[in-house]
Image: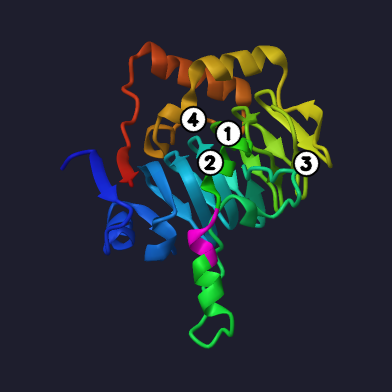
Amino acid sequence: MSRETLIKNSSVDAAATMKRLGINHNLKADDVKRFWGTIEAPVRISETRIFHDFSFGAFSYVSGGFLYHTHVGRYCSLSNGLHIGQGNHPVDWLSTHPFQYQNLKFHVGDQFIDRELYEEDVEATRPDLREGVPKPKSTHIGNDVWLGHGVVAMNDIRIGDGCVIGSSSVVTKNMEPYSIAVGNPARVIRKRFDDAVIERLLELKWWNFAPWQLRHIDFNKIDTAISQIEEMRGNRVPEYQPQVVTIAR
């Protein structure tokens, strides 16, 4: 069986196919149509709305929220109530409302009294004005990142490998690897390890192995764990090649 699979996000069975390939989710067909990108199986995606470009690394999970233009590494633990990567509205125009530059999205019923005017107005929308709206850039979340409940992260930032972001924090700038940050705006209160340990971890990239390759590791003894993974590297243990599912438009 191939380790790479292509799925059209508009396919009627896209959601079901994703499940069969190791993507545990509760997305509906219309939800899948809203995003495109790559997912490495296995992962778990629960109670989450995903929009635009997206990627999700193997053995990561998200428990709920909104992800816009978001790219997530492996072994990430993303809690619920998240709001990641949404773009901004213009603040120096007549209004901050998007009616000025994109089609209205209010799905009016057949008994809406101004339905005809509404439908005519949809045709009159000024998409040319959209060029003046700042385009959101992608938000990148590294490997082995833990986001607590209710974290908000702005678009166009990077949360480094090994970071921990406390509940209800608002991340407005890049976070260095293995930082622990809390607050609004989020500020670093300490690092998970000293600089020498962090340097070794970043060089090892242990997340490129599967759990079943790491069961002999003394996880709760960081120096021993690093030495054991260095030994794996020295013995040229092959990195895990996950099944990759490409969701295409």
Circles 2 and 3 in contact, beta carbons < 8 Å: no
Amino acid tagged 4: Ile
Label 4: element kind: loop
Image point (23%, 38%), residue name: 3
- In the image, the segment drawn in magenta is 121-125
- Which residue occupies the extreme left position in the image? 1
Report the residue marked by disc 3: 92
The kind of residue tagged 2 is His
- Gap between marks 2 and 3 measured at Cα: 24 Å
Q: Within 10 Å of the Cα at label 1, are there few (<14), some (14-19), or many (20+) other Cα atoms?
A: some
User: In terms of sequence position, does the residue under pointer 4 or pointer 2 come before the other?
Assistant: 2
Mark before the other along the chain sequence, 2 or 3: 2
Given contact means CB atoms under 8 Å apart, are the residues at marks 4 and 3 in contact?
Answer: no
Question: Residue 238: x, y in percent?
Answer: 31, 22
Q: CA distance from mark 1 to mark 2?
A: 7 Å
User: What residue sits right under mark 4 in the picture?
Assistant: 217
- 2 or 3: mark nearer the eye: 3
- Of pointers 1 and 3, the one earlier in the residue sequence: 3
